[in-house]
Image (cartoon, rainbow, N blue to C red):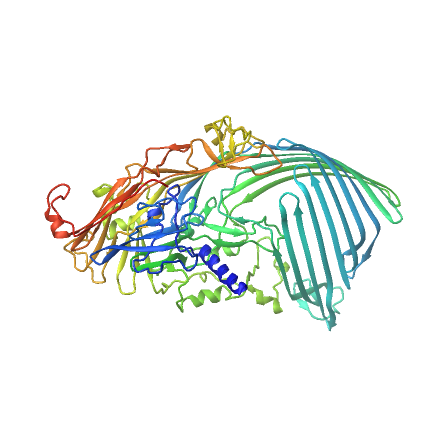
Amino acid sequence: RKRIISFFLLIAFISEIVTPTASLALTGGPSQPEVQAFTPVNTSEMVDLTSGDFKYNIPLMDVGGYPLNIAYNSGISMDQEASWVGLGWNLNVGAINRNMRGLPDDFNGEAIEKEFNMKDNNTFGANVGVGVELFGYKKAAKTSSSQNSGVKLNVGLGLTYNNYTGIGMEYSANIGISSGESGKGRMNASLGIKASNSGGLTVSPNVSFSAKTDSHQKGDETTTGSAGIGIGMSMNSRSGLKDLSISASYNRTTEKNTQRNFDGTFEKDWGGGDAGMSSSQSGGVSSAGVINFGASTFVPRIQNNMVNNSVALSFKFGTTVFGYDGDITLGGYFSNQSLMSKSSSVPAYGYMFSHNGQQSDDVLMDFNREKDQAFSRYTKNLPITNQTYDVFSVTGQGMGGAFRPFRSDVGYMFDNSATTTSDSYSGGVEFAAAQTAHLGVNISVVDVHTTTGKWNDDNEAKDRLSFKGSVPNRPDYEPFYFKEVGEKSTDDVQSALYDYMGKDEAKRIKIVGLINHKADDVLETTGAGNSSETSLTSGGNLISERQKRNQVLSTLSFDEAKLYGLDKKIYNRSYNTLGMNISSSAKGHHIAEVTALRTDGTRYIYGLPAYNTKQEEVTFNASSKTTSSNNPSQNGFYDVNTGYVTYNTGDRSTSNGKGIDRYYNNVKTPAYAHSYLLTAVVSPDYVDLGNDGPTDDDFGNYTKFKYVKQATTDYKWRMPFDDLKANFNEVGKSIENDDQGNFVYGEKELWFTKEIETKNYIAIFELADRDDALGVASIDGDQGSGKTMYIKSISLYSKPEYNADLSVNKVNAVPIKVVHFEYDYSL
């Protein structure tokens, strides 16, 4: 019974985490609670079956067929803000909430700015190492490489000085055991131990085994097979498990001996004398898998240009005696890392405009990459790339669902352009005596120019897997479209793209004829290997036909809405009735109007985007803290009760001079819409006769919603709210000067429902300013003058009687029904 109960509780918790029944946001963030929580008017359950929270729903009135209700949800969280009808309560007529993932999907070149500063990182070091190999031997295998077996031991001691961490000691030891032959079976085991006063103790054990599984010859064909398995991990005394990997591999190869003539032709048999040269053709199948449990994820971020320089010198002395091979190494080094620039601005392209983003090299794309790592020719597994589309939650009486954009094509992603220039100089002397005496000198100069960005050279996928903004002779082509999440619908036109991308099998691109390869050096894989390769043809990575969907969600950009929107006055910035017009921050390509089409033909128009006009995410070094409560306003004071640290305005700038790194990072995101407010619901037979939005002379039925903005200036929000306070992050327990402070600041529009109008009725919302939920004064916090609002009453009138009253405040019109709200500020 306990297991059954536990199982259902686990399912309940997971479902609440993944798809919460009520999403309540802070006013201290890029949204407002009035549009976040929605409860249908027909909700009757008084207990949330997934969480056990108490729920209460009260129908208030019906405005010409559109119901209004107020709902309560218990389980108030510590950081939950009250809506315009009180804490835990909400009255939401309907809206679209945008869950932004990565970049806003409708960004089309908006510049994301980054200010960054850190002190140059300089390291000086000297080290001594001792290496010992006992009873080791080399045995030549049947292949051209030889196999080492025996016991090896290496120990090292180093002394370093770093201008970040000061003087440090480093100890290292590594013991390895190898035995067996690759032809029969070979075991390798090693244990690495590394300790330093700055990095703690790291233990790294690794074990692997490999063996030949098959070997036979038939005619001029030789078939060999091998398999291997390995496990490795890395454990640190301060950060815990850093990495755990399990690997397995299988390889089977068939080689066919042939003779290649000098004219490039092949002959099957030997016997051509000296008229040819030996060669072999091979084909086979191989597979390998690695499970890694310690990698971090990647989110879109701006790469910084860096400069690295290093110099190293080493002296190695050794001797060889029967059964013993030992050496002593003395070395020294210097390295430097510095920034090329402290500020950058990169154009950003969201999911919907990926086809425009790929036209340039230095842009920020909307994607997430799992297990990110540097790429080299030895990289066997590339990180998994996922585009981070936004999710739009649509709510309204009689309407609901979660929608996301889909693209009609498959393309490739890349990082913004960044360069790292690395100059490395090293020199060394080696001397060994006894059984085999030798002397060696090595000098190395390495100039490395590392570039991060789009892969342009020899990229077979660049042209064949490019995003398409348009298709010739297809004016109805959709680069992107919206579809309900989880909708089950069949579409025959998707089968071509499905087949082109290899169906459900993992595929790699077959690369032939690269510029830097000679034709004779390119051998096409034959046999079973073709099952994991695919050849890409131009134009096959898209679906040109429009996609089927059961429930349609369509969008208009700002430029399109000015011409084709239902109520075009909203998009004319000179129109100021009730202050209901689009933000001055709106761009022509931003989503301005969203239409949700119900299966019976009813249209829900979400035509007023509510903008978050400014957002800054700031992190900086906030060291020199004290926990003394004598002077809580002191710069660097850390309050253990609140978790905040006090700072000066100069700390949040590139001139920050605190701590070991003088760190400062500020990412500024341009304006984007956090919500889309419901502006109209029109019947299937509705006709806009005057092309001026819902009015009394139109055919059919409509419900129109009007809103008022909280103030002429945007509401300023900040987390945390307090003056010159930031969230405290201690970073490393063992380092005193790496403590950081961070905060998020922004400015946003706040919209509140003012009127709901139908052909026969009108509901008037009487609003007033709240005494709580005040905005901040500036980016450094403190109480400001910005206020949010609450509902005092809602009055329902007969529309003819309301319009007949010519008095300013409509005092002579008699309401059909009035709902009054009473509040207090005790909480």
Which quadrant is home to the C terminus?
Answer: top left
Q: Which of 780 and 350 is in front in this view?
A: 780
Whole-percent x and y of residue 240? 63, 47
- Where residue 512 sits in the image (x, y, percent)? 57, 59
* Place of residue 762 in the rendered image (x, y in percent of width and height, measured from the top left): 18, 51
Residue 664 visible in the shown view: no
Above or below 256: residue 483:
above
Which quadrant of the view contains residue 668?
top left
Asked if residue 95 can be seen in this view, the reply is: yes
Q: Which residue lies furthest to the bottom in this view?
A: 219
In this rendering, the count of numbered labels is 0
Q: Residue at x 37, y 63 (%)?
A: 547
Q: Quadrant of residue 165?
A: top right
Residue drawn 58% across and 67% down?
531
| Observer-nearest of 141 and 655 | 655
Left or right: where 105 falls relative to 768: right
Question: Horizontal and vertical percent for residue 726?
Answer: 47, 35
Q: In this view, does 442 lie to the left or right of 754?
A: right
Is 746 in front, or is 457? 746
